[in-house]
Image (cartoon, rainbow, N blue to C red):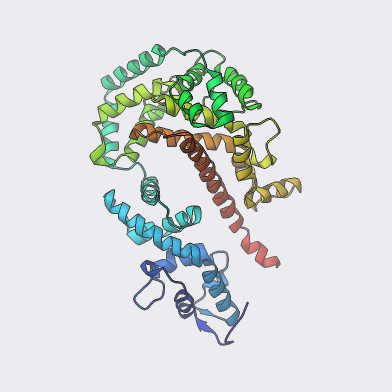
Amino acid sequence: MTTGSSEPRLRSAVLTRAWERIDGVEVLSSADGGPLTRTIKKIIDPLVIRTVARPRLGRPVLDAIAAAEVTELLLADADRLRATAAWFTHLKRQRRALRITAGNVQDVCFPLAYELATGFGPPGPEAAETASAALRDLHGEGGTAGVDQLAGYLADPRISADLTRELERRWHAETAPDQDIARLKSFVDELSDPAWRALAGSAAGHAFGLALRQPDGARALSRTVQEISGLPAPDLGLQRGDRTAVPPLNRRDESGAELLERSVERRVRATLRRLPPDERAPVADLVDDELARAAAGFGLSVPALAACFALGVVLAPALRPLDGAAPAGVPEFARQLNAQVAREGYVLHARRALAAATPLTPRPDAELLRDLREFAKQFLSRLWVRLHGFDVRGDLPADAADVRDLVTGVVRSTSLDLRTKVRRALVARLPRLEAVS
């Protein structure tokens, strides 16, 4: 690290001089070429330099060593800052499209843009959709008017009673066809277009999901998974008991977070998040659509989407990155997915920490390690949410490559979330590390 002049320097001047050496960040810059005040407050200090952990780098006047360190940290993050600037442009555009007015756009979107740059790098072809989804997640339920209408509709005791009876009727009217394990196994093994067309055009996915509603359904699912993948199915967070219970109508009546037992209200709220106001049907129609969807196998009305989720269920038991490589006999696609996560730096760090019986972070590790050990459960949760979105919007995977990309992308996004959790926990350890270094 070079120190340059030994004279103390104003921190603002140090930041400006370093910032001017980074191109492509104009939307984050002031007229004089330095970073905007909000850029410093929302991105540079908390996320790049991390002044909470390095308070000596946040002082108004910096000595030569601190000035050089600030410069080095800023320039080392130049690629991500350029990506942040590009993401901010997409976020502003999508904010206008979604008619979001809450909060100052820079206060809200600067940290979010940096988060997207961290997770995805520079914006790609799906940047608009990614930015829109991130804004909807950030701003809650996506349209208070629709949520208020839904709450009012479900609050009517007579309507609520009628809807509950209708859900029960549709749920019990569904009969599980014979399971076509061969089609599912064929696609897992081949990942070919002919195998996908055969699977997507069949009722195999729905049959797999409906079988979970039978007595001892969880054990039957485990046997089927083991027959196809060679691994028994752990608790995948699909249902609380040995068979799927009829989901409640209202969110207040949920007994847990299990995927297939989420309330109709929660599912419709997700629909309201995904659809812009001008594309939404009346609330009564949205609820009726969700009743039909909830009654179908895996809570997905389209056979091809239910087949995608069945594929995820079969692959999930192999996703155990803390254990290293998947065992022999596991389908090759599952081995590749697990290897994709197992070689991540944060997973290797966690494995070394566990092997040495040392804490992974300065805080209790139980929750963090549970998240890592339950990677399969988190993967399935994210996959189901993605497929539910497809169902709502009428989207379908076009071919086997689309299915592979979908599953691979969900594994990657699940891994990125966990990596961020570990990084945040480790940042809390920095002051202690600096104190002893």
In this rendering, position of residue 325 left or right of residue 275: right
- Quadrant where the image shows the N terminus: bottom right
The residue depicted at 31 percent of the width and 18 percent of the height is 161
Q: Quadrant of the C terminus?
A: bottom right
Between residues 391 and 53, which one lies in front from this camera angle? 391
Note whether 169 is above or below 42 in the view shown.
above
Q: Is residue 347 above or below residue 262?
A: below
Report which quarter residue 247 is drawn in: top left
Q: Is residue 435 visible?
A: yes
User: Dividing the picture into quarters, in which one does residue 315 lie?
Assistant: top right
Image x and y of residue 186, in percent: 56, 25
Q: Residue at (36%, 48%) from the top-left corner?
A: 132
Q: Residue 306: x and y, percent?
A: 45, 26
Residue 259 position, x and y percent, is: 48, 29
Decide which of 320, 422 is in the foreground and name it.
Answer: 320
Q: Is residue 77 left or right of residue 363?
A: left
Residue at figure coordinates x 54%, y 32% from the top left: 191
Q: Is residue 256 visible?
A: no
Is residue 27 left or right of 206 when viewed as pictured?
A: left
Q: Is residue 98 above or below residue 189?
A: below
Q: Give the answer, above or below, for where 437 lies relative to 346.
A: below
